[in-house]
Amino acid sequence: MKKTSVLDKSETRIRRMFGTIAPTYDLLNHLLSCQVDRYWRWQTTRLVPPQNDGPILDVCTGTGDLALAYWKAGRKQVPVIGADFASEMLALARRKAARRRARNVVFVQADAQALPFRDNQFQIVSVAFGLRNITDYRRGLAEMVRVARPAGQVVILEFSRPSQSLWGKLYQWYFRRVLPCIGQLISGQSAYYYLPASVFEFPDGEALAEEMRCAGLQSVWFHHFAFRIATLYVGTKPGTPM
Ligand SMILES: C[S@@+](CC[C@H](N)C(=O)[O-])C[C@H]1O[C@@H](n2cnc3c(N)ncnc32)[C@H](O)[C@@H]1O
């Protein structure tokens, strides 16, 4: 039987992997990050807040945490769309939105490489811990830029390679050695071996900022969180606001 490489990023494998880990996804996210992932998403909405009542799109939305954080940041008035191709993740996102009575947050099943939206629609197009997983992430980035409004913001929250400080090195050991074992124990899946492997082969810092410039974004900046464990990248689509 053909053995799947830990870094196989075919659409089928990625979709199946996230569909399978969906039931334990939130639990493991919050547990393995000691809840810090919540803080990063909240900080993202503080550093790049909604500017008006135009719609916001969150791609690779998973169970919808960043979409709902943006809904809250927009004082529950701004319409938010969360898009993902894994129906199991979307089912959990919809349940979460219903519990919060977030009626203007909708979740749609869509491939981030071919978004079913017209050009120039959204004031913010965000992605948290998702870009790295898109089979052709450059195509995903190009799609995010396409659907953002002129002067709109493209926001990427992603894991990065930790600094070489003592804490950074300790975290790296935890991330590579401990986290995959806990992940496998709780989810029963080997997906948590894919996580560190995918982070260490994905561009981060200036390299990802350069990819954003190549995708047509301007004024690109990035902000590291906690020993560079995660980084927020922001770029502006050229043009005058519509
Ligand atoms: C690590 S999860 C991140 C979920 C969420 N954004 C968060 O902050 O927790 C990555 C998500 O990206 C989705 N994904 C990966 N590739 C995709 C693609 N090509 N199109 C749509 N969704 C995709 C997966 O289904 C999964 O839900």
Image: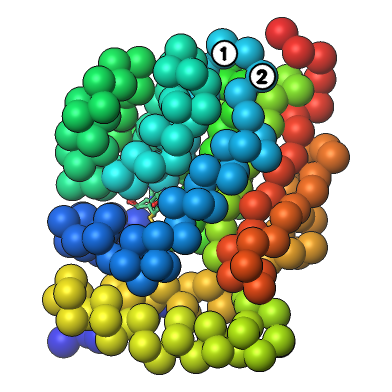
Disc 1 C-beta below 8 A from ligand 1? no
Location of residue 197 with respect to 137 vertically, above or below: below
Q: Residue at x 66, y 19 (%)?
A: 51
Q: 135 or 100: which is nearer to us?
A: 100
Q: Amino acid at mark 1?
A: Gly
Q: Looking at the figure, which quarter contains the C terminus?
A: top right
Location of residue 170 with respect to 147 vertically, above or below: below
Disc on res. 166:
none
Q: Residue at x 61, y 24 (%)?
A: 50
Q: x and y percent of residue 175 in the render? A: 46, 82
Mark 1: which secondary structure?
Answer: loop
Q: Amino acid at mark 2?
A: Gln
Q: x and y percent of residue 36 in the render? A: 47, 60
Location of residue 63 with respect to 206 vertically, above or below: above
Q: Residue at x 79, y 48 (%)?
A: 221
Q: x and y percent of residue 223 in the render? A: 72, 55
Q: Is 41 on the left or on the right of 62, as rendered?
A: right
Q: x and y percent of residue 202 in the render? A: 59, 69
Q: Residue furthest right?
A: 219
Disc on res. 54:
1
Q: Looking at the figure, which quarter contains the N terminus?
A: bottom left
Q: Nearer the viewer, mark 2 or mark 1?
A: 2
Mark 2: which secondary structure?
Answer: loop
Name the residue that disc number 2 marks.
51
Q: Residue at x 18, y 81 (%)?
A: 185
